[in-house]
Amino acid sequence: MKRANLFLLTFFLCFLSCSDEGERNNALVNVFIIGSGGEFDDILLEILGVEIKTLGSRGTDNTESIFLPNIQVDKRVNIAALTANAQFLVGRGELSLNSITEITLRLGEDNFVVVGNQRFPLQIPNENVANPSFPVNFSLFGGISHDIFLDFDPFRSFLITPGLEPTVELSAYIRPFMSLEKGRANGSISPSNQRVGIFTFNENGEWVSSTGSQAPSGNFSIRGLEENKLHRVLILPFNESYLPDTLDSVSVNIREITQLGTINLRLIEE
């Protein structure tokens, strides 16, 4: 009986040791997509999953790729709804502790936008557009979860050709970032039923990101901002009866949320 107990104890300790070793040598990676509607009511993308490329065992001499599939049966994702705290899990998996060097989003063929009651299929001119890739340099650490975000910018992702039969061509502009390295700023728009475009610029005046407020709450979130930087946020109402507004010197701390409060839109005096 004592030998049996000793065997079980040895097996249990070995199991714990192996589990700890596995956690130290691997990292859990979650890839999310966020966005907003921009000038569209809906943006439906068929997302098959995401491919992640990491440095191989010989460093820069070779690379390794792993595909993380979108496990949902209906793989269409409404990018326009992914504002404020909303996000969609594109794929999840364990990776070895090598730096991520490239991320590729894999799209299917059922992609379209909606304006009013009209639906326009997205034109995808080539393979590069169907599978947009982004070079990155994300370090992975053992035993913790890493959340990677693909920030889809609707104001820079489409080429619209007007006419009797207008066309909408996709050229996805996506900003990848890891939440461990960034901060975010939250706020709300009043009146909450007014659609706005929210544009963020860095200290050099470079366009960082764009988003919108979420209906019907009016809440918004600016994610993936650099720490110890002063950002300028421009709020442009879609309703021309309201004035634009600006927030200067917006700063964030890493892995924290800065509260911007409520931005009250002002009517243009007639």
Image (cartoon, rainbow, N blue to C red):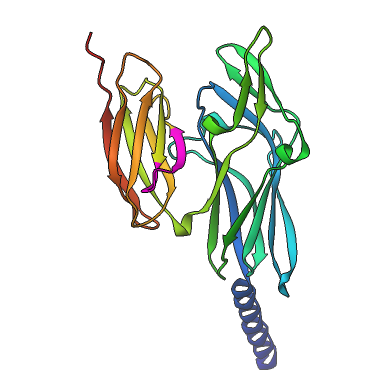
Splitting the image into 4 quarters, where does residue 93 fall?
Answer: bottom right
Q: Residue at x 45, y 34 (%)?
A: 211
Q: Which residues are magenta?
A: 201-211
Q: Is residue 38 left or right of residue 2?
A: left
- Inspect the magenta stretch and tell me whether residue 10 lies in it: no
Query: Is 179 left, or right, of 235 in this rendering?
Result: right
Residue 221's x, y, as percent? 40, 40
Q: Residue farthest to the bottom?
A: 3
In the rendered image, which quarter is residue 154 located in?
top right
Q: Residue at x 36, y 48 (%)?
A: 203
Q: Quadrant of the C terminus?
A: top left
Q: Residue furthest left?
A: 269
How many callouts does the rendering have?
A: 0
Seen from the viewer's position, the closer of residues 238 and 42 is 238
Q: Nearer the viewer, residue 15 or 111?
A: 111
Q: For residue 171, which quarter of the picture?
A: top right
**Can you say which quadrant of the picture contains the N terminus?**
bottom right
Residue 4 is situated, as x and y percent measured from the top left of the image, at 69, 88
Vertical order, 14 against 35 (above or below): below
Q: Is residue 207 magenta?
A: yes
Which residue is rendered at x = 37% and y = 26% of the image?
236
Q: Nearer the viewer, residue 239 or 144?
A: 239
Above or below: residue 122 compared with residue 270:
below
The spot of residue 28 in percent (x, y) is 60, 61
Judged left or right of residue 61, residue 176 is left
Q: Residue 115 appears at what percent x and percent y? A: 57, 16
